[in-house]
Amino acid sequence: MNGRGLSVTLGLAHRQMTLLIKNPSLLFPPMLFPLMNFLAFAGGLSRLRHVPGFNYPGGYTAFQFVFVLLQSAAFGGVFMGFGIARDFENGFARRLLVAAPHRSGLIAGYWLGAVFRWSLVATMLTIVALIAGMPIGGSGVDIFGLYALALLVNLVGILWAAGIAMRFRTVQAGPLMQTPVFMLLFLAPVYVPLALLQGWIHTLASVNPYTLLLEEGRGLLAGTPLHTASAFLIAFGLVGFFLVWSLRGLRIAERAG
Amino acid sequence: MSAAAAEHDRAECRGDDATHWPRVPVGLVTTLGVMAGGDNSIEVEGLVREFKKGPRAVDGIDLRVEPGEIYGFLGPNGAGKSTTVLMLTTLLPPTAGTARVAGFDVVKEGPSVRRTIGAALQEAALDPMLTGREHLRLQAALQGIARDERRAREQELLARVGLSEAADRKVKGYSGGMKRRLDLALALVHRPRVLFLDEPTTGLDPQSRSALWEEVGRLARDEGVTVFLTTQYLEEADVLADRVGIIHRGRIVAEGTPSALKADVGRSTVEAIPAEEDERARVAEILLRFGDPTQASPKGVAVQLANSNGSLADVVRALDEAKLAIANIQLHAPTLDDVFLAKTGTSLEGAAEDDEQDSDAE
Amino acid sequence: MTLLLNQIGRIAWRSVIRTARQPAAVIPPLTFPLMLMAVNSNGLRAATHLPGFPTKSFLDFFLPFSFIQGALFAATTAGTDLARDVDTGFLNRLALTPMRGAALLLGELGGAVALGALQAFVYLGVGLAFGVHFVTGIGGMATLLLLAILIALGWAAIGVLLALRAGSGEKVQSQFPLLFFLVFISSMNLPRNLIEVSWFRDLATINPVSYLIEGLRTLIIEGWNAQALALGFGVAILMVLGALGGASIALRQRMERT
């Protein structure tokens, strides 16, 4: 990306951050929902660690922390998709398309805004988890790996949602952005390890690429990573796939004028 | 717009011809079903509205609107127009003062006031998911109109505002003009005697605007409805209103018929440009018979007429008798903006910007 | 009285029409709880292996949560729509008619309750189709529907209250997460006696939503437990009365007419 492209990205990211700071209502729901999930799952379901076969070494709080961290990252991206759709509805996006010399820089700008918002959520979640006594078994490198994985999930989330937003250009496409992500996240070993799932959900979770990211994230937090390279390979693969998806969406939006 | 053009438009909206047919007395008009009879006037004395934060939005206004009259309440954004309408329609209690609408006190007799008035407030408050017909049905039901009467009333109003064909389309697909016309139809469902229109043409294209003016003029002319209309458009007040009240920062700074208000602030100017430049002195000599010299364009000669704009014909005749060839002759009549400028020290557009910063009351 | 009923009917009709014409307002509240039910009833099936878990089917245990969640979604829609009416001035238009405040309140609630009732029938039908067994039989199903509709009415009244106080759709939507928080800190996923973390168990115990869920749940997995039913219906009725009272006051302030 050249200097002008970078300035578009940074300008848009700055606008997204300003919006967030000036409108707490845009910040609180994305912050509150992961926190609620974390409290409800880690607090309300902790007895599940006594189910025969539950063998995660980090404890139930850590087990749920990783799920909620990755969930918040994915939905952080999706929520930014809502913002993109709103920008198309009110005409702001058209002005951006006219002004930006390198329009792909717009997607990067929105992502930086999403990263800013998610970083606030992740920080708060981490603090709450530590206060709740979550043990950290992994090394510094492992923990860095966990957050890097979450960042890639955040990127996948926004690339997916941006692709939808630019194809439909209305906030009414919101459910279309959210629902597949929700299904992908929950058709995975959310409450108990994969081995304890039964029936169709076990089958689906076994082929769901997100399962590997989730399990590897849990492994990194507990200090027992097993398939780190595979997890990052899948994450980068998803980023590549959805980058093409979102850029095609951008072209469709450009053609629509 | 020149005074003559405004007068012509006013006559068209009102359906008057050059001989000024007498207005149909209120009480005799029952043909199209507007509730006739009773006192259709609006009387306001010392009306005040203060908001917790900010200046007095309305600061002691007095006015009287005669039955069947179209009263134009002209002022920039934030001047207090909408606040006044909200008080007169019983939606906002006044801080002080009294107001009677159709003979009922807006504070003590709110339900009676609401029965007699119709209002199209500043936002065309419509449900985008309902059709035009469904809006009318809902309004008719809430107004307590008998079931067997509703359908006929609905058809009549849809036809009157030109929405019969679009009646079964959702309002979200309506244009701004269609929404405003539906808004007007909704205000008329229960045959009001007094109609409040708060900036009814803001944002409309010229065609929709003139259609709405025509309908409002017809309501007053044919049905004797008293119309209280707020506007920030000089032209609208000039064309449509019988009398105009100019409001600035919560106070009425001038009131009267548009022509009287304009006559009050200054005389019309006639400027003539001779066809031959060397005839300039002769043209000036003739023009000076009709008034005092005033500033003109480089090639022209201008005088401020002594007897308002009625002397234009005399000027033309005198020039003709002197066999002077004239390339262009123009009458510059004072506008309501001149009135606003004279009364407030600022033009209407400038005042809007100032007042938007000063007041968030509206 | 006839006029009042006519007005209530008209406002309710408008509320139903408006909701029905917005697929985005109907489909997610209907389908999202079903998705969560499908995912959780399988994903949490392992919980039935815990000693003391009251049933062998997690679907039986989890079904009541769908009614609570669906009704809350419907209330969000009702609240947001009413707030938009305040915001756009539509409420002012209604205020200029002889409409009584009670007609607006009850009419607005009518739309939300209609959606709530539709949801309740759908969830019950889906639950039965996937093998939910009611120990209380047909009578229990009818009682469950009654309680579910009462709960929908309660949530909708809260939605209307929030809308009248906030007066903007965005504000209403930003307040609803707090209600979801109440739902999450309840006995939705495990019976209270099996919640291990003491602060969570204490919060779930003082949380009225737990009693709504347990009132519904007892009809499916336990039987005619008078205490659970009394608490369920009692909390629902209090919720309806409290929210309606608050909404009436808020409406009076919002529709301040002379």
Image (cartoon, rainbow, N blue to C red):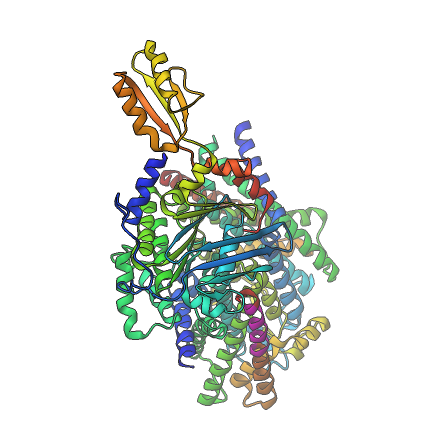
Q: Identify the residue shown where x is 46% and y is 41%.
A: A93
Q: Nearer the viewer, residue A109 or B101?
A: B101
Q: Nearer the viewer, residue A189 or C29?
A: C29
Can residue C122 be seen at all in this image of the molecule? no
Q: Identify the residue shown where x is 28% and y is 74%.
A: B148
Q: Nearer the viewer, residue C9 or B120?
A: B120
Can residue C223 be seen at all in this image of the molecule? yes
- Which SS does the magenta portion mostly show? helix
- The x, y position of residue A248, in whole percent, is 41, 41
Q: Is residue C29 magenta?
A: no
Q: Is residue C250 magenta?
A: yes
- The x, y position of residue A30, in whole percent, is 59, 55
- The x, y position of residue C98, in whole percent, is 44, 71
Determine whether B37 is above or below C148 in the image: above
Q: Nearer the viewer, residue A110 or B297?
A: B297
- The stretch of residues the image draws in magenta is C240-252
B183 relative position to B15: left or right: right
Instruction: Give the total number of marks visible in the rendering.
Output: 0
Farthest-out residue, front: B289
Q: Quadrant of residue B182?
A: bottom left
Q: Quadrant of residue B259?
A: top left
Determine whether A246 is above or below B45 in the image: above
B294 relative position to C235: left or right: left
- The x, y position of residue A205, in whole percent, is 50, 61
Determine whether B111 is above or below A9 in the image: below
Farthest-out residue, top: B278
